[in-house]
Amino acid sequence: MKEADLYPALKAYLQAQGYEVKAEVGACDLMARRGDEPAVIVEMKLSFSLSLVMQGVARQGVFDHVYLAVPAPKKGWPQRYKDIIALCRRLGLGLLAVTAEQTVEAHLDPAPYTPRRNLAKAGRLLREFDRRVGDPNIGGTTGVQRMTHYRQDALRCAFALREGALKASLVAKAAGVARAAGLMRADHYGWFERVSLGIYTLTPKGLEALFDHAAELHALTHGPKGDADAA
């Protein structure tokens, strides 16, 4: 397939809506007009790519109504389809797809985008940033366990139990973790075992965590201790 193979279907699609359509007007792949309405621009590529997005953004410097057009995938849209739609929406670009049967699917119309901030999520991220001790993770890594503030609190509690079982209230005081009782009761990591009401000890997995996170524990137990909401 060539890019030119997309043009007949796109032209017919717009003509059916009353537009006059012309190709290669200046740098525009396709320009359409309907009476005194604003012009519609369509930029074509054989796949959705950064090059196509940049082309569309460049046309937005001249016209408001800009579409990107690609062939419709034969085996369905890729898993990142939602991301593609979200990107186009955020940039104010429309998205059209030309099928093998030479029909056009309109996936998104161009429109101004005003993002709605997720204030709750932003608050959680800011609290995590403020309460996490140091910078224990390496940016850009994948498939590795993340050190969160919640995990740091769990390590503090495990360290307080290193010599044997204790009441949750004593763990909270020794570790400087006010939520120690709830954290050990939830036992997300399999580190804690309740031996009787309100009294906890470490599991073999918890003892292993003390060894695995020895360097992190040194930073935690010799640095500031914090208190936090449940993870």
Image (tube, helix red, strand yellow):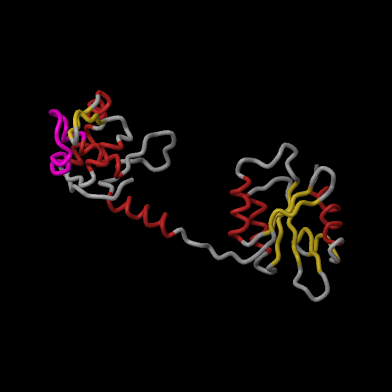
Q: Which one is nearer the viewer's eye here, 20 or 145?
A: 145
Q: Which one is nearer the viewer's eye here, 121 or 102?
A: 121
Q: Which one is nearer the viewer's eye here, 163 or 68?
A: 163
- Is residue 210 placed above or below 132 in the rendered structure? above
Q: Position of residue 15 (x, y in %)?
A: 86, 62
Corner quadrant of residue 53:
bottom right
Residue at x 25%, y 37% (from the top left corner):
184
- Is residue 135 placed above or below 212 in the rendered structure? below
| The residue stretch that appears in magenta | 158-175
Q: Is residue 183 magenta?
A: no
Give the residue furthest to the bottom: 36
Q: Which one is nearer the viewer's eye here, 23 or 48?
A: 48
Give the residue furthest to the top: 204
Q: Position of residue 166 (x, y in %)?
A: 14, 33
Q: Main secondary structure of the magenta part?
A: helix
Corner quadrant of residue 208:
top left
Give the residue furthest to the front: 197
Quadrant, the C terminus? top left
- Is residue 176 placed above or below 16 in the rendered structure? above
Residue at x 80%, y 60% (from the top left corner):
24
How many dots with numbers?
A: 0
Residue at x 15%, y 42% (from the top left corner):
169
Residue at x 16%, y 32% (from the top left corner):
161
